[in-house]
Each structure stands twice: as C-alpha cells, then as structure tokens.
Amino acid sequence: MSALLSVRKLSKSYGSRWGLVRAVDRVSFDIATGETLALVGESGCGKSTVALSLLRLIEPDDGQVIFDGADFGAIGATRRQRLRRNMSIVFQNPYSSLNPRMRVRDIVGEPLFTAYGLRGRELRARVEGHLRDVGLGPEHMARYPHEFSGGQRQRIALARALALEPRLLILDEPTAALDVSVQAQVLNLLRGLQDRLGLSYMFISHNLATVEYMADRVMVMYLGRIVESGPVEQVFANPAHPYTQGLIDSIPSTNPRLRNRLKPLGGEVPSPLNAPPGCPFAPRCARVMDACLAAIPPFESIDDTRSVACLYPMEQEADS
Amino acid sequence: MSEAILKIRNLTVDFPGLGETVHAVRDCSFSVRKGEILGLVGESGSGKSVTAMACLGLVPPPGEMRGSVEIAGRQVVGRTHGELMDLRGGTAAMIFQNPGSALSPFFTVGRQIVDVIVSHQDFARRSARDLAIETLRLVHLPDPELAVDKYPHQLSGGQRQRAMIAMAMACEPDLLIADEPTTALDVTIQAQIIVLLRELAQETGLSILFITHDLGVVASLCDRVAVMYAGTIVETGPLPELFDAPAHPYTERLMHTVPRLGSGKTELAYIKGQVPNMAHLPVGCAFHARYAHASEVCRQRSPAARPLGGARIVACHHTLGAPHLREVAARGAG
Amino acid sequence: MSAVEASSGAEPFHPSLGLRLRHFASQNTLLIIGAVIFLVVVVCAIFAPLIAPYDPTAMNFPHKLRAPGLEHLMGTDVLGRDIFSRVVYGARISLLIGVSVLTVAIAIGVPIGLVSGYFGGWVDATLMRVSDIFLAFPPLLLPIAITAALGAGLFNAMLALAISWFPWYARIVRGSVMSVRQELYIDAARAMGVGSLRIMLRHALPNSWTPAIVQASMDFGYTILAAASLSFIGIGAKPPTVEWGLMIALSRSKFLDYWWTAAGPGLAIFLTVLAVNLVGDGVRDILDPRTRGIR
C-alpha cells in the first residue's frame, strides 16, 4: 500500500546577516492512511517549519511533496490547490488561531464557503455537523471565541480543520496550551475522530508521553535533521540515538521515588548559525568519538522499521 | 518539626468588579517549613499565581487581600510598599514563568543583579559586581565573567532563567517563590533547572514555594505538596505518600489524566465539566459537580480542611473508605 | 467518547441598567463631560435656525460692536451681526469640516495601510515612500500650497487637509495590520486557501481598525483647528461663509478694543476641540484592553 503522503528531502533555509540558517535539512518521511506520525523535538529543531512547509505557508527551498501519488511540484496550480484541501492544520495556540471578531459559525464555515461556495442552509447544516463531531452543539454557533475556554476553542479549531474533510490533519502541539485535565479530553477526541473518519495525523509535540499515547511512529528532530525514527513504543523503550535517550532521561517521572533517574543533558542546543562540523549533537554527547566530529552521520536503517543518524547508535536490547 | 518560613492562614483575595466579585483565593492556608520545597499544584484558574503574588504583597489592583501571610515571622497583609521593600528580594525572592519578560531588556544582566544587591545590602558597586559574578557561577551560567555584561536578549531561554534565579539568589534569601519557572522551557532545560534548584536548596538551606501544574516536576523536586482547586487548598501532604494514595478526588483524577511514558495507549481518564466561575461559585464543595460520587452534604456545605494522619490534610467530606479511594485500591497503587 | 463541557455554578448575575450606567459614569467621567459638550455642538448645528436668535448674515449697522448683553448674548461684530447666532451657525461648518476631512483621509489612508501592512516587501516600501512625501511637509504648508494651486475656498481647503492627513491613517493601520498578520488565524485562513483580498477585508481589517478610530476621534478637533487656521490666514473659508476661524480673522483689527469679537468664536473652537479630545481619550481607554482594570 503506497503512502498517503511522501516527503523527500524537504529543505528550508533562512538567510540572515550572520549566515545561513538551515531550519530544515533534507527531511524525508512517509505517512500512511490512518496512521499517526509524530514529530518530536525541542525549540528550534524545525518541526513546525516542516508542518508549515507542507501547507505552503512557508515556501520550502527544495524537496518533493507527493500526496496520494501526485507530486505537488509537477502538477498544475488548480489541481494542486484542490489536492491541498486534503491537508489541514490545528495550531498550538487556541487563543490566537481563531479570529476574535468572527462568530463560530463563520469560522467553521469559511473554508466551505471559500472552497465550494456553500451558503445558507446547506452551509449551516455542514457546520452543525462538524461542530457535533467535536462535541459542540448548534447553540454555540452564534458565539464569539472569547466566550469559550481553551479546550473548547481548540475544538472549534478542530471543527474548522475538519470542514473540508481532509485526509491528513497536521496537529502542531494541539494540547500544549491547555490545562492538564482538558488535554485528556482533546486527545481522546482526536483518537475517536481518527478511528471514525480514517484520518492520518502528523502530530508535532515536545511532550514524549503525549506522543506515545497518540502516535504509531515517531521521528526525532535535532537542528533541522531527523536523527531517529521508528515505531513509537520501540523508540522510547530502546532509543538508538543518544539525543532520544537524553530526552527520555530529562522527563521528570510522576513517581517521586524515581526522582534520581532524572538525568539532564548537559549544554544547550547550539545556535544553528554555529552548527558544529560533523554530528550536530556531538558537543553534548556522552558517547562522542573522533569520527563523530568529522562528518554528519547519514540517516540509515538499523532494521526494517527503524532508522537512525548516528555512527555509534545505542545497543538495542533483545525484543521480549 | 522545623518552624515555618512562610505561614499562610485564611488568605482570601477578592477582585471586585462591576456588581460581582471574583474570589480568586478563598480561605487558603498552608505553610512552607525551613529548608523544605513545597509544591503548590493547580491548573489555570486555581488561584495559585495570585497566591504567589500575595506572598510578597504584589496583588495587582483592584485586588483585596485578607487573612495572614507571614514570612520569617513578619506580616505581609496590610503592609505598604515601603514597609515591604526590604522583604522583597532580601528575605524572600520570586522568579517567574517567562524570563524574557521578567528581565529588563535595557540593562545588562550584571547591572540588574547589582541593583538588587545594592538596594538591600551595604555594598560598593565594584564589590557588588564581583558578588554578581559569583552568583552567576552559583547557577552554572557558563563564563560568568562574560555573561555579567550581556543583555538578556543575548542569552538563550535557559540561560535567562538561570540569570533570573541568580538575581533572586543574590541577597541569599530564606524563601524562594517560583511561579511556574520551567513551564515555558524545553524539557532538557527544564531538567537542568530542576537539578539546579535541588542543588541550591541542599547547599544553602533555601526554602522554596514551587508553583506548577506539572505533576512530574513536583514529583522530582518537592518534599511536600499542596493541591489547589478553585481558590482553595484541597489537600496537603508529603511525597511520596500523597501521590501513592491521594485523598481528595480532584488530586486522584488529576493524576490519572496525565499521560505517562511507558503507559502506552491505555485510555486516559478525564475530569468531566470545567472549573467553576470564580465569581459565582456553587454552594457546597467547589468540586462536587465534577465528581461522580458526590453526596448530599457535598452539594450543601463547603468542606473544612482536617488532618488525616501522617501529616496529611484534606478538605473533603469523604475520606478513606470513600468510593474513589476504593477505586484507587482496586486499580492498584499509582 | 468526547464530553461536552457543562458549566456548573449559579445563574450569571445581570447587573441592572442603572447600576451599569452609574459604574460607567464613574469610570469615564471625562468622557461623559466631553460627550455632553459635543452633543451641544451637534444640536446647535442641526437646529441652528431654531436656536440662533438672529440671521447670522443680517447686518445691522446701528448695533455694531455692542458688548455682550441681554439683546446680544455674545455681542455684535463690526457689521452689526449677532455673534452668538454666527457661532451657532458656524457649528455646522465645523462639524462638516471634521466629518468630511476625516472621511476622505480614512478612505484613502486605510486601504493604503491595509495593503502595505499585509503584503510588506516592495509594495509596502513604495506606498510608504509615497505617503512619506506628504508627511514631509510641515503641517499646513501643504494645504497652503494646494489651495494656492487650486484657489482659495472651503472646499479646496478641506481637500487639501484630507490629502495631508491620510498618511497618518495609512501608518497607523499599517502598523496594526503588521502585528495582526502574525496572528495564527491569518495563517489558518491561508492554510485553508482563503484569498488575500478576503483575508485583508475579513480578518485583518476588523482586527486592526480600532487604533484608526481612536485617532480619528482625536483628530476631529485638530481638523477643526486646522480649518480655522486656514481661514484665519485667508485661504480657507471666504465670506459670507460663517466659519469660526474666519470670524476670528475678520475681528483681527478690532478685537483689542472689542474683545468679544474674537472671544465668541474662540471659545467655541476651544470647547469643541476640548470636547472631542476628551471623547477621543475616553474611546481609546475603552477600546485599549491594557488600560482596563482586572475583570
């Protein structure tokens, strides 16, 4: 079965007066129908840039985006626009992603009006349906965003994203700005919708526990590159890249007896302008060797489902 | 039992508005003992940030404070700005969530620390600068002699947070109030700051009031926990006992709504409903509408805080033997 | 299964209208004072024939240069015309000036600012350089130059004022749009394929026009002053138009001995500009969320 979305060597750089910043450096991945792929990393790793590039909110410098077999670069503008309706996005900040001067029915209805020219009763019926899918009722349609809580606003944003019945939904840290007790509601809603509507998700987050809960496969990014990828349970249980291990060790456990397991990684993510030669993680890596400083390690498979960009990946414990 | 460095008794903070008053903090009582790290856990709207501000008398107008807040035996409620000046930054210091906005962009980091030192202690500026460099070294800021002359925008997020901690530590306070200092940081930097705070507490005997919504951070750092909901403390107790067996249903539910690494795809629980409107609180317990096993007394009377044995306090009409605790036992601890 | 969030708690409190008005009055006293004065000016303008005791252009030489008294509340001018009636009728012209100049300035400036702020790049650079040309002239010099080219008269003066005023609105709206452009709902609209024009009109403009409105409410007074100044130097309104600035100009040779010939129109200008400034300040305080107290 071919992938729903294939991305090959996506790259985006920014010029600044101090030099070239490679925000995204030759990123490649596939997402299958009904699958959730997570993109994990800390600030500045490029995960949001990848998402925005897919939707053409940022113009990538290089790379191929192939949706359902059609290469975006090779087809005409009209067809590209129509294909792009299959992808949709929910942003992190529910307070800034909804126009404060628009009513809910207009917010959710706008994509339908723009794409299909729907109006009146037909539009209203569609909007009601999508709101119902996310657990909101018709009584909410005439209200403004400020009348809702963060969790409800995120549902409105979700209803808007679902309006054009996309096949792939990009979720850029959808619960990061929400209270803990509301996060669970939204995550469960997302899982339910995926099962019911057969959606694929690209789930971007820095919270590994949430990623484990939501995703099938995960990609770990560092300074614009993918350093590890594979099925989520395996990658988190047996990380191959030292950075992935470092991320896992940095998560404070909710079990107070395990507090001494907290092992912070030394140093900080270097500025992309001062990217060291060789492996970008080398300055912080406990396992660094001379070869690591000489050249950027290639991203290679270590078995059928997992790949890593490391010259000395960590040992994999035998599968139980 | 050591004495309390921070003693809060029946603290109430109201924000009067047009015809209605927001009761941000209601009859809140807890203490921080000398040398301990107390975690104040709550979500948005729980009143935890207002409580932090109230400790130093920094509640913004039109907020009104009532009750008692004592730091090292000195009363804060009802004092004027002038009377509190030597307390703030001297005996007690505060660090905030967003280091970018808590540090002034117009002055170097060193200058801001020197300003704090000079306003509390009798130092010449030159020796104050040396002390500032030492404080930056204390928080493991790399190359403190160079960092002292840097502006905040020249530092990374993690470095800014360390600089803010340095500023707070400059006058060797007895109490550090930390209002969500790691929430806006990347997880690896957050881990570094947690370890730093642990280290500072151990080496200098610093007491910390650590405010957060993140249960993992609390578990990694705190000795005792106070859980806040709808403006009041619902439960207090030491770790790990409180996390092993939470006595208040809110705490218990909260712990089960957080995804944990290693739990895979087990369906998350959630708490139905939402936080009540702080201007129109329901009669009775503020949590009763969201609790499946609420009884008649929960709907009628607000529960008072009472001791539960083992240095634990809870404000709930139900206790051990209550349905939710039976569920906890059935599910297995934690 | 998702849960619909139900709200708990008692029924919301609805303060009575009286309570709301009293609260509003106590927080915004100056605004109310300004609004009342302005209302008086508007009433004078609308009902001038009913309020003015005399025909403003009726000359009455035997009554000339009479001090303020019961017969002539503000006295008479050198041609025997009742100053109070002329002040009342003058309100019409002043309000007309304020509304017309600002309407044209906004109609030109806001679209320029909107396009400039939204697209940025060379579009922004070009439009801003063009409006900079108008901004570079000292105030009033440009209107003088324009009226010199087109001929004196109230209409040309208003046109000149509007042309020299629009760059301010362009800049204000541009700044507002530039910050609104960073908001995620703009990105969301673009991600949905919404066209630039619709984004500008439906998303950017409604969220960025408040500073322009606040500026307009404050500029109202300044336009009146500017028109009065132009009339004073002889290139604005011409007789027999009844305009406050022109009235002061005509009294130039007399007012040292007959102070009331300038006092009447002068007081009218002063009160109107003050009122409009108070209203403008009040409007800004209401619309600017940062100056509101804790809710």
Image (spheres, coloured by chain):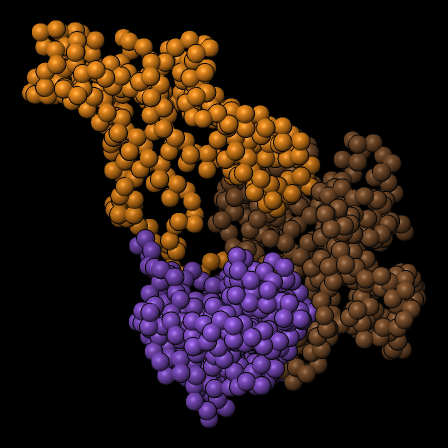
Q: Nearer the viewer, residue C106 or B48?
A: C106
Indicate the colour of chain A. Answer: brown
Give how far across and how far down residue A152 sits, in percent. 56, 53
Q: Colour of chain C?
A: orange
Q: Is residue A154 left or right of residue B320?
A: right
| Residue A315 pos. (x, y %) | 88, 76
User: In this view of the protein, can residue B284 be seen by the observer?
Assistant: no
C263 sits left or right of A70 in the view:
left
Q: Residue at x 50, y 80 (%)?
A: B172
Instruction: Kindly indicate which chain is depicted in purple in the rendered structure.
Output: B
State the residue in front, C112 or C207: C112
- Residue that appears at 63% across and 71% down: B144
Q: Is residue C282 visible to the viewer in this orientation of the structure?
A: yes
The tally of labels here is 0
Residue C48 position (above or below residue B149): above
Q: Position of residue B34 (x, y in %)?
A: 47, 86
Judge from the rendering whether residue A82 lies leftward or rightward of residue B206; answer left or right.
Answer: right
The answer to whether C193 is drawn above or below residue A184 in the figure is above
Q: Quadrant of residue B120?
A: bottom left
Q: Nearer the viewer, residue B123 or C228?
A: B123
For the point 85% across and 64% down, the residue is A279
